Image (spheres, rainbow, N blue to C red):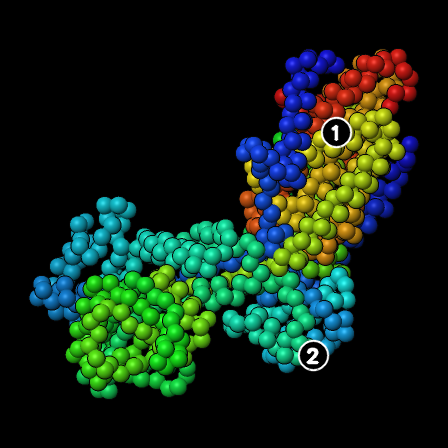
Amino acid sequence: MLYFSKLRIFFILFISLFFILIASSNLFKFDNSFLDKKINLGLDLQGGSYLLLEIDNNPLIEQKLQNLTTTIRNHFKEKNIKLRNLKLLNQKISFSVDENSKLVILNEFNNQESDFNPYYQRFKSHQLDLVEENNIFYVSYSEQGIIQLKISSQDQALEIIRRRIDEIGTNEPNILKRGNDRVLVELPGLDDPMRIKTLLGKTANLTFRFITNDDEDSFGTEKLMFEDDSGGAIVSKRIILSGDNLLDAQPRMNNETNETVVSFNLDRVGAKRFGKATSTGIGKKLAIVLDGKIISAPVIRDTIASGSGQISGGFTFQSATDLALLLRSGALPAPLNIIEERTVGPDLGQDSINAGMIALAIGFLLVIIFIFVKYRIFGLITNITLIVNLFLLIGILTIFEATLTLPGIAGIILTVGMAVDANVLIFERIKEELKDEKNNLIAFDSGYTKSRTAILDANITTLLAAVILFFMGSGPIKGFSLTLGVGIFTTLFSVYFVARLLTVLYVSKNKEKEGLI
Amino acid sequence: MIGFNKYYNQFNILSVTLVVISLTLLIFKGLNFGIDFKGGTLIELRSSDSKINVSSLRDNLNTMNLGDVSVKNFGNETDFLIKFENNDNKNTIEEIKINLDKSFGNKFDFRRVENVGPKVSAELLRSGVIAITVALILMLIYIWIRFEWQFSLGAILALFHDVIVTLGLFSLLGLEINLSIIAAVLTIVGYSMNDTVVIYDRVRENLRKYSDIKIYELTNISINETLSRTLITSITTLLALLSIFFFGGEILKGFSLAMIFGVVFGTYSSIYIANTILVRLKVSQRTVLREDEKN
């Protein structure tokens, strides 16, 4: 079909101009909010840090089971059932009971409305599994229980991570869940992630506990080391205050001792407990424990009823600031491990942009020159098509504010190289048709028709590869598949609309000319 | 007309040899996996002092107990790439910074730091292998729907040839396999298929048109008819890739090199593998007409 209606010509022109305008909004600033869009630069181009964190839920599971052990003991004590050898080993609680109490135990655990084994209504499965083996009961988290625990700890961790990063004031961080025990953090523009890594690496579990010299503490004791490696001390397991009781924490300069300290304010419950503990414990040492290490253990001299206090521990101003930040933003539910890190400095990012742009310019120029030399007038048409194609591609990426990565730029350059394929297929076909067909118009028409299947086949295969890459790839590679995939559609549009319109215009003016192509 | 078909046998022997050599290399020498797939730490450094060289940097880092450290220039004399395997120390990078500052003065800019843990690298490797496998299967399905089985077999063998020989070359030259190489391999899969399909389209068209020409001749006619397209597209694609290789920066070197190999092999295989399979399977006009009747 060699006829283009006015409407269609208008449509082609409109689309082309629209995308040229959109694409150019990357270079100029538009007042119009719709036009004022920009392609996002990936971390590899603008510089920044990519951190993949994994939540180590084992300590959390351990701790929950520890609490559960106490709950189970108390629960069955009330029911006058004696549990023998109640212990926690390898994330399993085990105990044994008399033969006639077994039914009660089974009922308590597997009852649909069981109090300490909930969820049944929601998931048709209990939080805990109860197994009996050789007259010993084993209690452990069920599959559903583990999943729920992971999801909730991931939610909490995400919130705490967000607070900590916001406190530092990084611009536009991207914090996303991955799976059910990972969190992805993207920090654009950050070239030294050391501080954030240190801050995220701390669980920031703060407790105030008495140091005891005897083993007669009814809550049990444990030996903890001092932060500065100056030995250890026996600390009671009874927690007087925890980080949850803090309302605020700030680094301060203590004017008397000339030392940097972290001052804190407690909530009402915390203030009451702190007041009581300091009044009964005058003369005792109160250990301030952070993540299993004693920061300091001052001697209590007075009752502190104001609900505020200070933590000293040989801080520098930086470390006091960080500790205050950690205490303000709260404790992580479980420790985090950084399992993948990719940081690109802003210099390298800019170098990559420059190199990518130079490669694009040179690649584009080489292709254009080659095609022009090969096809002359039709080369010119192909080249115009190619330019429109490039604007369409960049325009679409801009409209969706897609993320451009270095491999993404490679994808654009590759698209330039491969986009001429469709036009070449058509032109070569027209050449062949012209050998037998004297009528230029008919030869052109059948050239387009007969090359269509080959063009579609060729583009579908590339598209398949791009789609797989998009779903399997990560980060920069996704950027490559995106430009490659979008490039296929823009290529087809520019070949079948723009190039075709131009060839039709040219051929209908030169109907009689011999050796046209 | 160029007589491509005169060399069908010779090039088939060459291809089989190349595939065997590549497979041998892949099995016995293996691939040089980068930290994406092996895990470990990579640091790209730029020094402001041209006197600092690879060996002085290596000597310095060797005092730090990092295990097997590899240090080499990256692009130019003042850029270095340091790689070492994972260790349990979380502050290694900070310690390297301090150590380098102490020994050389504040002369280094840490341009890039990548650290991939063992769990992540295993996952990346697995998803890379899955991606390539899924791509090959999808191509197989596509080609199976579009063409007769003889064509499908030819196209897939050409595809395997390209992927295996490209990876074999990477193994031979000891070039690093990282995430971008997986992207390159997948693009090669698409490109090789693309090239094969264009020639196959013509073979099938000619099979319908001429009943008296044997497949041996007919493939040659088809190759010749599509030859200028094959060459022009390969040339423009190679121009684009060479531009990335020479001007696109160090990071894209491996990717563009793999693609350049792939395009060359892809073009070669669509002529000398895809077509010879049709000849060997004695494809004739009946093959396509039978399929047409079914539809």
Task: Between residue A75 and residue A14, name the one nearer to us.
Answer: A14
Q: Position of residue A266 (x, y in %)?
A: 26, 66
Element class at badge 2 = helix
Q: Can residue B193 be seen by looking at this rendering? A: yes
The image quadrant that residue B274 belongs to is top right
Residue A217 visible in the current orientation: no
Q: Return the chain for callout 2.
A: B
Q: Which residue is mark 2?
A: B59
For disc 1, the chain is A
Residue visible at 61% across and 52% down in the picture: A46
Secondary structure at numbered mark 1 = helix
Q: Is residue A454 above or below residue B275?
A: above
Q: Position of residue A25 (x, y in %)?
A: 63, 36
Q: Label 2: few (<14), some or many (≥20) within 10 Å?
A: few
Residue A23 vertical position relative to residue A300 in the rendered view, above or below: above
Q: Is residue A74 left or right of residue A457?
A: left
Q: Which labelled disc corresponds to residue B244? A: none
Which amino acid is tagged 1?
Thr
Residue furthest out toward the front: A255
- Residue at 64% in and 27% down: A18
Q: Quarter holding the C terminus of chain A?
A: top right
Residue at 20 percent of width and 54 percent of height: A110
Q: Position of residue A136 (x, y in %)?
A: 22, 67
Report the residue at 91% width, 32% height from top: B1
Q: Which mark is drawn over residue A385?
A: 1
Q: How many marks?
A: 2
